Image (cartoon, rainbow, N blue to C red):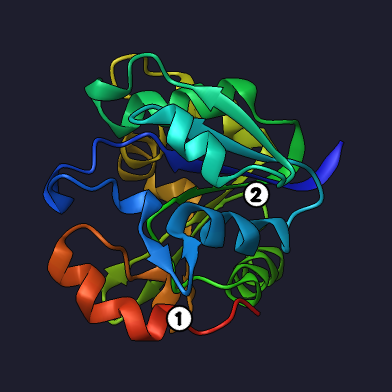
Amino acid sequence: MADVAAILLAAGLSRRMGAQNKLLLPIDGVPMIRRVAMAYLGAIDTDLTVVTGHEASAVRRALSGLAVSLVHNANFTSGQQSSVATGLHCAPDAYLLLIGLGDQPLLTTQDLQYLIAAHVAGDATKVTIPVHNGARGNPITIPQLLRRRLLENPARPGCLGFTRDHPEHVQAAKLPSPGFYTDVDTPDDYATHLETANEPIS
């Protein structure tokens, strides 16, 4: 069993970006999804589970050569919940599971290590969510004993429904790094964050 595993969601339609798939946009010459995957791979001790959907072949090519396990969500047009469920069914067993987004290019390996450390230092039986100035960030951490519970409501599988319905199983980690709270959804987002996102992964 791994100590830390991760699911990276890379299935979305990227509608707000227009004609381009945001996950394939270059950040310092590297596709965004590859940059984010590299950050995760530095923090976990097993292959990274990447859930694909929209333009799956292109996403697969962008991740070529990395230690990733690709899982396709055939129902990706229904929304993020189905992609989380797909990942939960396929990710390796681990004491701790990170569930994150493929469009957070400011996130670094060090950020993820800080999140893991905060989880361990707190109540390791709870879901840990990064927070800063009232904002919730991603990824979140799921302890092994709660993993199946994210699938117990078939009408609302995944993280959001569970964490809102069961606040007693959730703890906040005060982490200020902008990587947790910055995603890229629109052309303006991409233009605004491009310079910062070009910083090397640590």
Q: Which residue is mark 2?
A: 125
Determine the residue located farthest toward the right in the rendered image.
1
| Mark 1 element type | loop
Q: Can the viewer see residue 52 in this picture? A: no
**Relative to 141, is 32 on the left or the right?**
left
SS for tag 2? loop
Q: Position of residue 72 (x, y in %)?
A: 49, 21
Measured along the vertical axis of the image, is residue 192 above or below residue 47?
below
How dense is the environment of label 1, judged by Cα within 10 Å: few (below 14), some, or many (20 and up)? some
**Residue at horizontal 55 percent and vertical 54 percent from the top:** 34
Residue 151 to residue 115: above or below = above
132 vs 14: above or below:
below
The percent coordinates of residue 81 (x first, y second) are 33, 29
The circle on residue 83 is none
Give the numbered dot on residue 198.
1
Q: Is residue 136 visible?
A: yes
> Given the image, on which type of amino acid does mark 1 rest?
Asn
> Residue drawn 29% across and 78% down?
193
Pick the residue in front: 30 or 166.
30
Of residues 128 and 37, the one drawn nearer to the viewer in this rendering: 37
Q: Position of residue 188 (x, y in %)?
A: 13, 70
Badge 2 or badge 1: first in the primary sequence: 2
* Residue ID at (28%, 71%): 135
Q: How many marks?
A: 2
Amino acid type assigned to the residue bearing label 2 in the image? Thr
